[in-house]
Amino acid sequence: MIFIDRQEVISKLPEGWQAKAKTVTDALLAADGLAARKKIIGENEELWRSIKGVLAKVGHQKCWYCEASEVRSDNAVDHFRPKGRVSGEVHDGYWWLAFDVKNYRFACTFCNSRRHGDGGTTGGKADHFPLAAGSLRADGPLVPISVEIPLLLDPCDYVDTTAVWFDETGQVKVNPAVEAVEENVSLRVSISRTLYHLDHVRLIEARKRVFLEVLQMCDRADEALAAYKTTQNSTARNLFHESINALKRMKKEDSPYSAVAKCAVRGYRGSSPSAKLIAEAS
Ligand SMILES: [Zn+2]
């Protein structure tokens, strides 16, 4: 999971979009009853669909939850707080946020919808929005959502994005550094793993490949560095520098599974001088 800055999304909205969203939201607030609200939401779905490209671009064409590329997936605009109902709760959904851009997340089918994976896993967020034990829940537009302590990790919250850690197994783990300072981190990672379907076999395999590629590139850089130190050979020096460039590229947020690459570099920095250089250089 990489951090998505909502301010960047807002700055890229088409001219007039926010005004249209406000008009529809005002109509929702004035509507009489659930059926009237559902009708308004249904008639205006195009409003959030029209900015799918903006959300995709800010997330480098990758799902905000799992970093899977959208190349062959018809990704959707997910309402982080579900707009129609909340699974397991007596709640009409966060309908007043249906046209609030801050509630939108760009999501792949596996993260967004209930689906079975080919390795026997099941996941997908759908209408789920669990809260921490004891947390209040906003049940209408008069209650600010800030009263809530969500259990799902949010890609628009930097601390949340750092809670997930990856290792050579490709599995989702808890970042111990975050666990030491934040409540509920293990539970939140566990629930997010299930509801975002982050243990989908194809995702795990893709992460393992990236992790391994990073370690191999670090080894190549280390060997080139050792050869250069011994021989002062310019070819070895160039290979070292190019390998470091490649590692830097793998960590860039527009690269595949860049969060995995970051974890791989950090995890390898005790063994590899090149990983240490990349992890600690600004
Ligand atoms: Zn996804």
Image: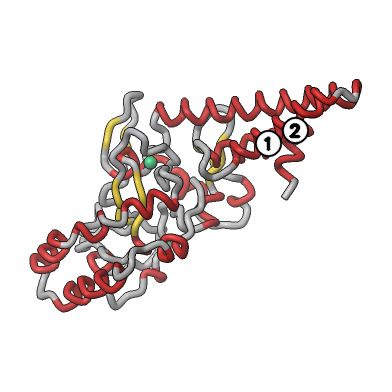
| Location of ligand 1 given as a quarter of the image | top left
* Amino acid type for the residue under numbered disc 2: His
Q: How many marks?
A: 2
What residue is rendered at 27% in x and 65% in y?
A: 99
- Give above or below for 95 relative to 272: below
Ligand 1 within 8 Å, label 2 CB: no
- CA gap between label 2 and label 1 equals 6 Å
Q: Which residue is mark 1?
A: 245
Q: Is residue 33 left or right of residue 12?
A: left
- Estimate the x, y position of residue 244 in percent, counting from the top left: 71, 34
Q: Which residue is the site of mark 2?
A: 241
Asked if labels 1 and 2 touch by Cβ distance under 8 angstroms, the answer is: yes
Q: Amino acid at mark 1?
A: Asn
- In which quadrant of the rendered view does residue 40 lie? bottom left
Q: Is residue 192 visible?
A: no
The residue at 70%/29% (across/down) is 218
